[in-house]
């Protein structure tokens, strides 16, 4: 009998970890919610399928595909219900490489040299033919061992993996897609999220009823339109605080009219306070 959904973290290197998630019921996984985090991530779908939304783009994800996201991208991956799902996720803190005595920027070009929401999905055939899937599986097997020099070997394998990614140039090879209604609505919310918008206003813009919009959007993204706006505002607040703005300045610039409410929502969705986030940026 296949196990219920479970998440396990591996390796002892600060700023880099490997996560393995697997099981039948993925509804409670954080993969089923929009992510607001400060790590670069590479997700490899070993089994299962679902829908991927990054920024205002949506795509299907199948077994064998890989997903990459930068720390500034808001993304959501809803796992198809009733299927067994397994994935390996690499979490890499952008500050992880700051102490290394060489220029590590080329290793991350595939994360940083893209427009937000473009080139996130690496199709299974490319993952397999490039050796990326095998490298991810080898790294995962390595971090589970209690072997001598494990951390050094894991670092070597990670650099090999990032070098493979740099050679893919997925963003440049991804063909343009027809803009779906979800894409249009997400883009509209992104453009107007700092304003005092309502679900009635958004529904009127797309000539649908507010009730239909609320249910359809929740089914496609796992969130209500208003909760999506909140997460988008929090993500932009992170960007502003990274640029040197105070938490209070960021709060009002992104559309909140009450700092106490901003503070409560920020801590709820990130697990830390705005001041703790700013300390991490130093």
Image: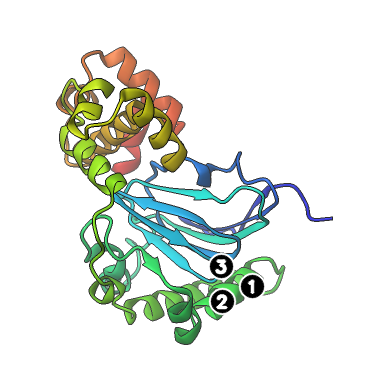
Question: Comparing marks 3 and 1, which lies closer to the viewer?
Answer: 3
Q: SS for tag 1?
A: helix
Badge 2: residue crowd in 10 Å (few <14, some 14–19, many ≥20):
some
Quadrant location of residue 105? bottom left
Q: Determine whether label 3 and label 2 are within 8 Å by CB.
A: no
- The image shows residue 112, relative to residue 71, as above or below, that is below
Identify the mark nearer the N-term, 3 or 1. 3
**In the picture, which quadrant includes the N terminus?**
bottom right
Q: Which residue is mark 2?
A: 153
The residues tagged by marks 3 and 2 sit, at their Cα atoms, a distance apart of: 27 Å
Left or right: residue 162 compared with residue 115: right
The reply to whether dot 3 and dot 1 touch (C-beta < 8 Å) is no
Question: Does 102 appear above or below 194?
Answer: below
Residue displayed at 37% across by 31% down: 276
Read off the residue under disc 1: 142
Measured as percent of width and height from the top left, residue 23 is found at 70, 52
Comparing 200 with 259, the one in front is 200
Tell which circle, 2 or 1, labels the residue nearer the N-terminal end: 1
Q: Which is nearer the eye, 150 or 72? A: 72
Q: Which label lies toward us, 2 or 1?
A: 1
Q: Which residue is mark 3?
A: 63
Q: Is residue 143 left or right of residue 258?
A: right
Q: Are marks 2 and 1 in contact (CB under 8 Å)?
A: yes
Q: Earlier in the sequence, mark 3 or mark 2?
A: 3
How packed is label 3: few (under 14 Cα within 10 Å), some, or many (20 or more)?
some
The residue at 30%/26% (across/down) is: 209
**Few, some or many C-alpha atoms within 10 Å of disc 1 (few <14, some 14-19, many ≥20)?**
some
- Taking the image as shown, residue 148 lies to the left or right of residue 32, namely right
x, y percent for residue 51:
46, 53
């Amino acid at each position: 009998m296949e196990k219920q959904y479970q998440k396990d973290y591996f390796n002892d290197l600060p700023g880099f970890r490997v996560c393995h998630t697997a099981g039948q019921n993925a509804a409670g996984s954080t993969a089923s919610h929009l992510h607001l985090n400060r790590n670069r991530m590479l997700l490899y779908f070993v089994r299962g399928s679902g829908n991927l939304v990054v920024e205002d783009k949506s795509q299907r994800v199948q077994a064998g595909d890989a997903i990459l996201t930068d720390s500034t991208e808001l993304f959501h991956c809803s796992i198809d219900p009733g299927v067994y799902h397994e994935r390996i996720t690499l979490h890499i803190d952008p500050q992880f490489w700051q102490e290394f005595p060489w220029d590590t920027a080329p290793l991350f070009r595939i994360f940083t040299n893209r427009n937000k929401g473009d080139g996130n999905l690496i199709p299974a055939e490319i993952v397999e033919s490039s050796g990326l899937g095998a490298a991810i599986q080898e790294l995962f097997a390595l971090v589970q061992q209690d072997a001598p020099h494990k951390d050094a070997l894991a670092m070597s394998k990670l650099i090999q993996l990032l070098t493979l990614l740099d050679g893919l140039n997925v963003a440049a090879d991804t063909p343009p897609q027809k803009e779906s209604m979800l894409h249009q609505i997400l883009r509209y919310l992104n453009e107007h999220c700092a304003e005092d918008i309502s679900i009635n206003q958004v529904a009127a813009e797309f000539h649908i009823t507010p009730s239909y919009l609320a249910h359809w959007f929740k089914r496609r993204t796992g969130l209500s339109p208003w909760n999506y706006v909140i997460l988008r505002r929090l993500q932009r607040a992170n960007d502003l605080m990274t640029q040197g703005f105070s938490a209070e300045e960021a709060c009002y610039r992104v559309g909140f009219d009450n700092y106490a409410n901003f503070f409560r929502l920020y801590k709820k969705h990130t697990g830390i306070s705005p001041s703790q986030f700013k300390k991490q940026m130093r």
